[in-house]
Amino acid sequence: MSSLSRELVFLILQFLDEEKFKETVHKLEQESGFFFNMKHFEDQVQAGEWEEVERYLCGFTKVEDNRYSMKIFFEIRKQKYLEALDRHDRAKAVEILVKDLKVFASFNEELFKEITQLLTLENFRQNEQLSKYGDTKSARNIMLLELKKLIEANPLFRDKLAFPQFKASRLRTLINQSLNWQHQLCKNPRPNPDIKTLFTDHSCAPTNGARAPPPANSPLGPIPKAGGFPPMGNHSPFQPVVSPSASTIAGWMSSANPSLPHPVVAAGPPGLVQPPNTAMGMSPAAFLKHPRAPTSAPGMDYQTADSEHLMKRMRAGQSDEVSFSGVAHPSNMYSPDDLPKTMVRTLNQGSNVMSMDFHPQQQTILLVGTNVGDIAVWEVGSRERIAHKTFKVWDATSGQRQYIFEGHEAPVYSVCPHYKEAIQFIFSTAIDGKIKAWLYDCMGSRVDYDAPGLWCTTMAYSADGTRLFSCGTSKEGDSYLVEWNETEGSIKRTYLGFRKRSLGVVQFDTTKNRFLAAGDEFQIKFWDMDNTNILTTSDADGGLPASPRLRFNKEGSLLAVTTSDNGIKILANSDGQRLIRMLESRTFEGSRGPSQSINTKPQIVNALGAVGNVSGSLSATHERLDRIPPTISSLASMENNRADVKPRVSDDVEKVKSWKLADIVDPAQLKALRLPDPFTTGKVVRLLYTNSGLAVLALASNAVHKLWKWQRTERNPHGKSTASVVPQLWQPNNGTLMTNDTSDTNPVEEATACIALSKNDSYVMSASGGKVSLFNMMTFKVMTTFMPPPPAATFLAFHPQDNNIIAIGMEDSTIQIYNVRIDEVKTKLKGHQKKITGLAFSQSMNVLVSSGADAQLCVWSIDGWEKRKSRLIQAPPGRANPLVGDTKVQFHNDQAHILVSHESQLSIYDSKLECLRSWSPRDSLPAPVSSAIYSCDGLLIYAGFCDGAVGVFDADSLRLRCRIASSAYMSSSVASGGPGGSIYPMVVAAHPTEANQVALGMSDGAVHVIEPSDSEPKWGAAPQENGTLPSIPSNPAMSSQASEPPPRLESRSIGTDDEED
């Protein structure tokens, strides 16, 4: 099927969904196999509709397709079997066993026998591995988590789990455009054409006495006269077009006759589409003669040609779209349960809040303005006030005032900037109730109308920009919430439910293109946009003022509402609560230092065998089913939380995987960039990306920080970090350097440096043997210092739940738990023998893991800070115990497995400090390890080596995927290093969102950013079964670079460790 035909299927799916043909939607999803509806699948599983579940799955995969598919079907049939046993329906259980589960006997006969033996038990929970099986509902939910991960990992579902992004009612829009085109081709176009069918092309029949249109130069015939298609009636198959209509904007932008009388509020203002000869008191021709481009707007880009064309179309009365007006807006899939009504946060602003707004992309960043002129920026997830000061806002480019819009006769109360079809304009309201609209041409107001209530009014569009609302209160206390008909300039509907005399000016907001919310009567009132009656209310657990101010975030998952004690409450729906919990579960909520895990997707172990990390590279693939034998441990897979799993790979699996290991030695085989630095001095001892991924921050051995930022350019429109564009070495205008405090007794070149960056990239905490300094990332100024040596700080990590608590590793081998707010050390942890070189929090396990130069690992409980366990890392073969030297730790995204790096090895440990896998330098990578870090997706490990090489390892198995020689990113003369020895990466930093981009901090002070080449977008090749060779040459010497599990660990296909911590 062609790509256009495929897209047509998606358009049909959208249309069917909007028309509520639910069964047909899912049938088409299944038969086309283009989109797997995870929500529908979840609903069917939770309802126990097993036949429908398998029928729907079969549209995308079969049992025998691959091991992921096999595990999916096994989990479903096993659950169905256990539920039959739980109901004591032996006959049904036998039927399921024979018809559904017997297919798996050919892959593991022992497993099938074990399952069969459950029939002999009075209660299958007597089986030790099923003793934790709960009720049916909880078992289904646990299984669903497993199934979702398997589906996401299954290559057959690739690109089928996300519905393409396009505007609502797209099929209707295309049909409307087609009808307009057909109308343009009519020989006798009527002003009000009559559309009766879509089965044949439209053509206007000539009327009696109608004259033929005058000849035109257009090859397609004459341009039709003014007129749009009328409503098709209640039985029309089409709802109105959701996409913005240019003529709609033209209606608002053409000014009405100021002399027209304004009727009472209930009737609303007269139509805003004014006859051409009355606009602004001049003809359209005269109106268009005025210059439309702003004369002094170097920092703003307004599309003059588009706005000119728009006004010409308005003058000609021509519309690009057919507007089937008079029919209700298409409904969407949201329910009242989607409204944020659960209170999850309380913020103390301290002064009266006058306005609020959420960041358009960072869903938990809230901007707050107060009555004393202060502006605060809050991170509502962490309750952190990021900024709090008096602001003056200027044009960012020129620093000059851009426009003055004059025309209101009373103080302006609110403004509402908006754009449609690239035409930018502003609505404004004044306290005399006047509504005006302005283009950026300094030519005066285009609209002059009265708002309901004739006093304080605010205006807002729906999220998709297609519906306009206003809310205001009169001097008498009467409040009005209305929707406007933009085309006619009249009030379309007035919403009911306000008290007769509001105690303040009512404020409102919109969300999800479906709901309205307003603060009135000490509560929040919600309306469905298509229903004038109140939908529901919420008092946010009390404490609200009479007319609270409120604001939704962009996704509608959070709602900020002001309180009577100068605070703000954050309400959330289920999505918002998950968002808040996700922020809370990050390893370092306030900061991500070099040892931080970037995200939190868990690793899983499945019922039929170890899939490894199912969020892994899906290019690695379809293994034969008979090579992954299931075991009886599958019976317990759904009962375990899978949080502490020892990944094991069977010998059979190892044998069938043909790894093609790339050896990159030439600059042409990758993209590499040395960041510009005219004053390279010392060594790069710490390096990290900012959390936004737009900059790189380095700390040199001379205690100086350097920050590189990528600028927005034509080649890099989003300003993302990349090896293809040179960034700017950034510094404040005053030339200030961000330099750490140093100690006279501890030479800076010998000191152990440490650094941690705040989550919002606004400040950095750092030390280089002296005091710990807190810097402002914008000004490079020192905000505060603390912890003067001795002992000196050697590692920093923020507490995952309290941004004011910092774990500080010290030179004297202790770990100090320090409260920044009260400047107090809460406790000291003692257990290491040498300085602390690594710290990592796991909130899911509620522990802190530390490592030191004594090559020891310690696990500490966050609750009471007692030591749970400690262990020395084991020396690899040929090296004597005990080891010494800097040891680093980092949690995997699953928050359960730990990457331990030492010059002698890379190792994966579990939460019990059991070593699961280990790799030591040898063969093509013989030099000591200098640094190692997980990629942001947790699928790769990047390691630097003291000979300048970089190794890229598979995170699950520690198999070497790719070796990058120093000659690939440095010239041979630089790489040799002269008399001082070779230049090598002292620290490796992983990009926070681009899994295949890495930055290297070098021993000569340079910083390099490297990425795979365009021809090979990923490092090395994943395990292959078909023997496909990568284009990058393979190095035979690397064929033995597999990791080895410790000898005492059994290597098998699957298995979970059920020991308790």
Image (cartoon, grey):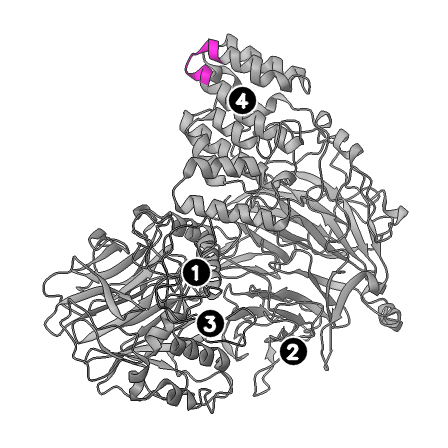
Mark earlier in primary sequence (1, 3): 3
Using residue 259 as the reference point, say whether residue 760 is left or right of it.
Answer: right
Q: Position of residue 498 (x, y in %)?
A: 15, 60
Q: Which residue is more in the foreground, 226 or 397?
A: 226
Residue contact at pointers 2 and 3, CB within 8 angstroms: no
The amino acid sitting under disc 1 is Gln
x 46%, y 24%: residue: 133
Q: How far apart are the two marked residues, 1 and 4, measured between alpha carbons? A: 40 Å
- Circle 3 residues within 10 Å: few <14, some 14–19, many ≥20: many
- The magenta span reads 84-92
Instruction: Please tell me whether mark 2 sits on a helix, a strand or a loop.
Output: strand
Q: Are marks 1 and 4 in contact (CB under 8 Å)?
A: no
Mark yes or no: residue 349 visible.
no
Amino acid at circle 4: Lys
Return the disc, 2 or 1, that comes first in the chain's sequence. Answer: 1
Report the Cα–Cα distance between label 2 and label 4.
58 Å
Mark 2 against mark 4, which lies toward the viewer? 4
Position of residue 576 relative to residue 1028, above or below, is below
Q: Nearer the viewer, residue 740 or 708?
A: 708
Main secondary structure found in the magenta portion: helix
Residue 684 vs residue 993, the one in the foreground = 993
> Crowdedness of circle 1 by 10 Å Cα count: few (<14), some, many (20+)?
many
| Residue beneath disc 4 | 78
Per the image, the residue denoted by label 2 is: 728
Q: Which circle's residue, 1 or 4, is located before the other in the chain?
A: 4
Question: Which residue corresponds to the image point at 68% horizontal and 76% vertical from the top-left?
Answer: 702
Residue 803, position as x, y percentages in the image: 45, 60
Give the tally of numbered discs.
4
Alpha carbon of mark 2 to alpha carbon of mark 3: how far?
53 Å
Asked whether residue 979 is drawn in magenta, I would say: no
Task: Tell which circle, 2 or 4, labels the residue nearer the N-terminal end.
Answer: 4
| Residue type highlighted by circle 3 | Ile
